[in-house]
Amino acid sequence: MPPKTRVTEDSIISAAIEVVRRSGFENINARTVSGQLHCSTQPVMYHFSTIDNLKKAAYRRADQMHTQYLMSIPPGQDPIPGIGINYIRFAVEEPQLFRFLFQSGYAEENSLLEMVNSDELIPVLAVMREGAGLSMEKTREVFITVALFAHGYASIIANNHLEFDEKLSAEHLERAWNGAVLAAAREERP
């Protein structure tokens, strides 16, 4: 008889991510996750005393996946529009994960200002700051403008109300970026 497969916390989180991808974050529960793992519900409840704790862990994993996706810019591509296009493309390729991240209420930050000041955003802001040649304060303002634009675009796509046209999206994103940088540069000059 083969030894029992040990169900780990990590494998449970991975299974929860697959449940989200397949049928949405609303369907994360002990039965769907254990079904994904082909085990009983006992290991799920052993590692996560509540389903809310499991959803929070899955959210953190999805957030890490999203950040990694955003920062995966091909060599030679300008990182500024690349990050924005990746944000929109993530909504196209992973609509259920996008909804989980941005429409589920599981974000740890309660406001856009908390998000823009979070440690997780530092790599994105550093790239933007270098590209814009602005102070960090002004870079954060530019980020907010561009993020609101890209998020609106991505949300419409993720909710099946707009077909993704990468070239057109990139053009719109470039305009938003240029306008936000120009306005911030004007304000930053003494």
Image: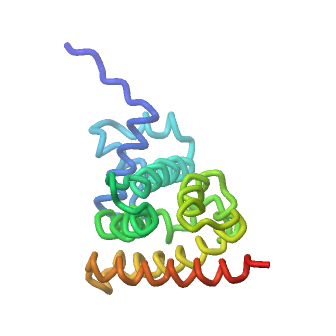
Q: Is residue 87 above or below residue 174?
A: above
Residue drawn at 58 percent across, 77 percent down: 181
Residue 7, given in percent of the width and then of the height, sits at 38, 30
Q: Is residue 85 above or below residue 15?
A: below
- Rendering quarter of residue 162: bottom left
Return the residue found at the far front.
190
- The one nearer the camera, 156 or 149, is 149
Return the residue found at the far right.
190
- Describe residue 101's horizontal placement relative to residue 166 as left or right: right
- Describe residue 149's horizontal placement relative to residue 125 as left or right: left
Residue 78, given in percent of the width and then of the height, sits at 40, 63
Residue drawn at 27 percent across, 38 percent down: 38
Return the residue found at the far left.
1
- Rendering quarter of residue 41: top left
Residue drawn at 45 percent across, 53 percent down: 62
- The one nearer the camera, 150 or 58, is 150
Identify the image quadrant of the N terminus.
Answer: top left
- Describe residue 175's horizontal placement relative to residue 179 as left or right: left
Residue drawn at 35 percent across, 43 percent down: 34
Residue 152, given in percent of the width and then of the height, sits at 46, 81
Identify the image quadrant of the C terminus.
Answer: bottom right
Return the residue found at the far top.
1
Q: Is residue 99 above or below residue 34?
A: below
- Describe residue 101's horizontal placement relative to residue 139 as left or right: left
- The one nearer the camera, 18 or 162, is 162
Q: How many marks?
A: 0
Residue 61, given in percent of the width and then of the height, sits at 47, 47
- The one nearer the camera, 84 or 126, is 126
- Rendering quarter of residue 182: bottom right
Query: From this viewpoint, is residue 15 visible?
Result: yes
Query: From this viewpoint, is residue 99 visible?
Result: no
